[in-house]
């Protein structure tokens, strides 16, 4: 048997060093993860580059052409290397090794055949596969028996089209210039008795759509192999499997581990060797699988996710769309082979559960056109790299008529961009693993026409920065974390009046010159004006919490800012109003100066009004340089006396500062010290619900003796759920622990409550894991 080794992607082995997962270290060790099992490579019975016999369709070949011996072929047959056709574009020409320079305007059918020898019997359970790259139609036979399915060929199965037939519709090859289609693999079932020792013939009739067609391509291969190959594509960001289940396995050397759970179900685990495994059932489309390790007491030691796409059916798309198009998950996984362009006035509608696998550089381009992506919590719309690793392009809206609207959308290794008047609204969406500096993971550039971007309950993770230039930006309930070196969590350049950042959490900017929020000017010209920052949680940045650039006008209200360099920096003639903020454990609380000319006696920043703020635990409460000024009242400044009504210097007495809870303890002297007798500092909770300073319940459902509690809580902290049967809570009992888990949304806890005795619930004070 002819045997050529196919090139298959290797298994992915992810090794997690436990100290690097964003959680406090409980134990040392590693956790490895392998997706899929190796399978023997398929055997090529016929390869496209082999030498084939071919007949031009100016007339019909002699009967028996699908089965006769090569030696019986008449003089109308010639031979040449596989890869037949012609094209009018350079990429598609690369598929052709035997060019058909006389086909255009002469004939529409082309006949090819290849004989091959089987020397050893093929096991009946081995699977046959036909791989085809073609333009526009074909019918294939093995030893005179038609192989299903025929593509774009006239007539019924079992009948041979006439020599002057044409393809019933068009089909582009993998390198075509209009809606190209990747080469397709057709499963022909078990080989059974079809591959007995001896000579066999693969015969194919190719059809063009018209004599004047600009191209024709015919590139076939025939393979035999394992009936159930793993076929797993393992990238650094996700895996793609072509089945509804997959074996996951690995080793776990994390100290004190007693159990490994996969999506909450016990895996086979040997603590002695550390080996674990489990077969995971997958839903068609996108799956996010949770892996956890626990000790014998039920304490979580480790958790991570792996994204797996189950591809059972696929559809290929690309190029310019005609009119309004609607895509649904029933069409399978969408392979985007080149950029999709939605022309002016047209719309693209995408339903819940759709998954798009994009080639490197491929984008969705909307020029004065519309995207409506309506995902669901249980069925997000996912845009991801086709190889699981490589950056693709973006969702790009251009022009005043461009409108991009999405809910429950997830982009992996791609970006969102609005240009020249485009508008976008995205809710409950997740943008991640895109560290390219330009264009940024979320980018607006309103030149010459200003853009508008609204984000609600969105999560941005592992990215360079968000850059919004000359646009009106409305961000609510969003979490941004882990920006890369050189970027910022959120950067406004020329933010327009009416822009706001409200109830957002921005965290973990662990590189020099990375700010949580950078409010600046566009290209040295138009500044950010009338921007409101309120109810936000900003922490863990090497540089500033809020940075105000040249002549910006920003209000900061009811925010908690801690563990940064400068809580709020007001620079270069900028104006700031700061109210009801808690600014703690930083190098500077307020920092006002002239960055452009530090030696100048003027040009600093101005806090024109501020009240009800707490600045405590900072190395320096504030610094005013270069003629900067501070107007403050009813605020608490540690270690200094600041002119202004109601200003004090009193220890706030935090409720639980060690666990990140900077709310006032019941004994705090600041409860009635603010303007109008209110409490000083931020009113909690602040930040995005998914990473809030304090957890909050959203719903409670009771069915029999089961209580399902849904709540928002910080993904990086652990909580205890406690219950009581009396309102006073004098007998609170712990009923569950809520562990830090990657990428949580709303968390569901189900507990059997005997006789419905427990009717009152609360989440205990958050504690760091």
Image: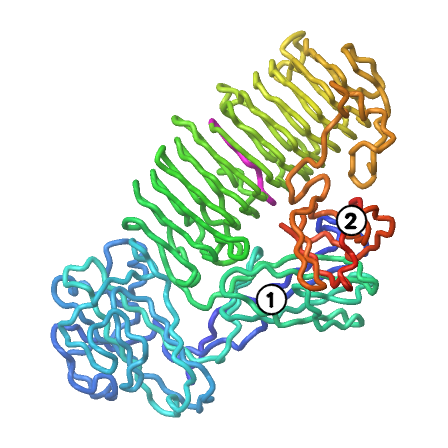
Q: Toward the viewer: 748 or 660? A: 748
Q: Is residue 246 rendered to the left or right of residue 130?
A: right
Vertical placement of 116 versus 318: above or below? below
Q: Is residue 240 above or below residue 461?
A: below
Residue 679 screen position, x and y as percent: 77, 25
Tag 2 secondary structure: loop
**Which secondary structure is most common in the magenta stretch?**
strand
Confirm whether the magenta stretch covers residue 462.
yes
Occupied quadrant, residue 293? bottom right
Of discs 2 and 1, which sits in the foreground?
2
The residue tagged 2 is 24
Q: Which residue appears at 77% of the width and 19% of the height?
A: 635
Magenta range is 461-470
**Is 385 left, or right, of 509 in this rendering?**
left
Residue 13, percent from left and from top: 63, 63
Q: Dot 2: few (<14), some (14–19), or many (≥20) neighbours within 10 Å?
A: some
Mark 1, Cα crowd under 10 Å, few <14 / some 14-19 / many 20+, is many
Tag shown at residue 35: 1
Residue at the image point whose x is 67% and y is 38% from the top: 507
Tell me the quarter of the picture where residue 672 sits.
top right
Q: Who is closer to the viewer here, 100 or 588?
A: 588
Is residue 97 shown left or right of residue 749?
left
């Amino acid at each position: 048997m002819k045997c050529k080794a196919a090139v298959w992607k290797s298994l992915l082995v992810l090794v997690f060093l436990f100290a690097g997962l964003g959680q406090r270290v409980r134990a040392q060790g590693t956790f490895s993860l392998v997706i899929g099992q190796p399978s023997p490579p398929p055997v090529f019975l016929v390869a496209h580059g082999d030498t084939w016999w071919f007949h031009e369709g100016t007339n019909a070949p002699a009967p028996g052409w699908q089965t006769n011996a090569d030696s019986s072929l008449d003089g109308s047959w010639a031979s040449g290397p596989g890869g037949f056709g012609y094209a009018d574009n350079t990429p598609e020409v690369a598929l052709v090794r035997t060019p058909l320079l006389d086909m255009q305007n002469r004939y529409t059918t082309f006949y090819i055949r290849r004989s091959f020898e089987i020397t050893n019997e093929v096991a009946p359970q081995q699977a046959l596969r036909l791989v085809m790259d073609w333009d526009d139609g074909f019918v294939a036979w093995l030893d005179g028996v038609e192989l299903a399915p025929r593509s774009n060929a006239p007539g019924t199965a079992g009948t041979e089209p006439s020599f002057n037939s044409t393809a019933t519709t068009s089909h582009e090859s993998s390198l075509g210039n209009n809606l190209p289609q990747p080469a397709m693999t057709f499963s022909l079932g078990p080989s059974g008795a079809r591959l007995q020792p001896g000579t066999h013939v693969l015969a194919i009739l190719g059809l063009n759509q018209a004599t004047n067609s600009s191209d024709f391509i015919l590139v076939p291969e025939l393979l035999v192999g394992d009936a159930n190959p793993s076929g797993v594509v393992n990238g650094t960001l996700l895996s793609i499997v072509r089945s509804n289940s997959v074996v996951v396995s690995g080793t776990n050397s994390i100290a004190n581990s007693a159990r490994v759970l996969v999506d909450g179900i016990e895996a086979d685990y040997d603590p002695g060797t550390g080996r674990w495994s489990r077969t995971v059932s997958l839903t068609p489309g996108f799956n996010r699988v949770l892996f956890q390790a626990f000790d014998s007491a039920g304490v979580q030691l480790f958790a991570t996710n792996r994204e797996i796409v189950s591809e059972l059916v696929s559809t290929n798309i690309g190029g310019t769309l005609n009119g309004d198009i609607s895509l649904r998950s029933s069409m399978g996984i969408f392979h985007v082979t080149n950029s999709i362009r939605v022309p002016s006035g047209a719309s693209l509608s995408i339903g819940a559960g759709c998954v798009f696998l994009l080639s490197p550089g491929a984008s969705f381009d909307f020029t004065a056109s519309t995207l409506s992506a309506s995902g669901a919590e249980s069925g997000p719309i996912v845009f991801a790299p086709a190889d699981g690793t490589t950056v693709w392009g973006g969702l790009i809206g251009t022009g005043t008529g461009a409108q991009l609207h999405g809910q429950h959308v997830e982009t992996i290794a791609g970006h969102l961009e609005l240009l020249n008047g485009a508008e976008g609204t995205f809710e409950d969406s997740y943008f991640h693993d895109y560290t390219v500096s330009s264009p940024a993971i979320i980018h607006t550039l309103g030149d010459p026409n200003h853009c508008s971007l609204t984000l609600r309950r969105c999560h941005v993770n592992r990215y360079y920065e968000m850059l919004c230039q000359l646009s009106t930006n409305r961000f609510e309930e969003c979490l941004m974390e882990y920006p890369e070196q050189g970027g910022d969590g959120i950067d406004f350049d020329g933010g327009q009046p009416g822009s706001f950042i409200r109830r957002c959490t921005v965290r973990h900017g662990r590189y020099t010159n990375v700010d949580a929020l950078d409010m600046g000017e566009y290209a040295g010209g138009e500044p950010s004006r009338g921007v409101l920052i309120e109810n936000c949680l900003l922490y863990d940045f090497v540089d500033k919490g809020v940075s105000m650039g040249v002549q910006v006008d920003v209000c900061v209200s009811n925010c908690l800012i801690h563990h940064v360099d400068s809580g709020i920096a007001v620079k270069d003639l900028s104006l700031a109003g700061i109210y009801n903020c808690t600014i703690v454990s930083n190098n500077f609380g307020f920092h006002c100066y002239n960055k452009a000319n530090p030696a100048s006696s003027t040009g600093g920043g101005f806090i024109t009004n501020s009240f009800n703020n707490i600045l405590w635990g900072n190395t320096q409460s504030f610094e005013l340089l270069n003629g900067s000024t501070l107007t403050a009242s009813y605020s608490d400044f540690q270690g200094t006396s600041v002119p202004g009504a109601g200003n004090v210097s009193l220890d706030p007495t935090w409720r639980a500062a060690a666990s990140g809870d900077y709310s006032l303890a019941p004994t705090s002297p600041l409860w009635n010290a603010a303007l109008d007798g209110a409490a000083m500092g931020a009113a909690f909770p602040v930040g995005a619900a998914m990473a809030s300073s304090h957890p909050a319940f959203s719903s409670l459902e009771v069915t029999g003796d089961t209580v399902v509690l849904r709540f928002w809580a910080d993904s990086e902290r652990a909580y205890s759920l406690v219950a009581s049967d009396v309102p006073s809570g004098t007998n609170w009992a712990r009923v569950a622990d809520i562990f830090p888990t990657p990428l949580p949304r709303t968390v569901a806890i189900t507990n059997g409550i005997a006789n419905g005795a427990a009717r009152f619930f609360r989440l205990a004070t958050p504690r760091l894991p």
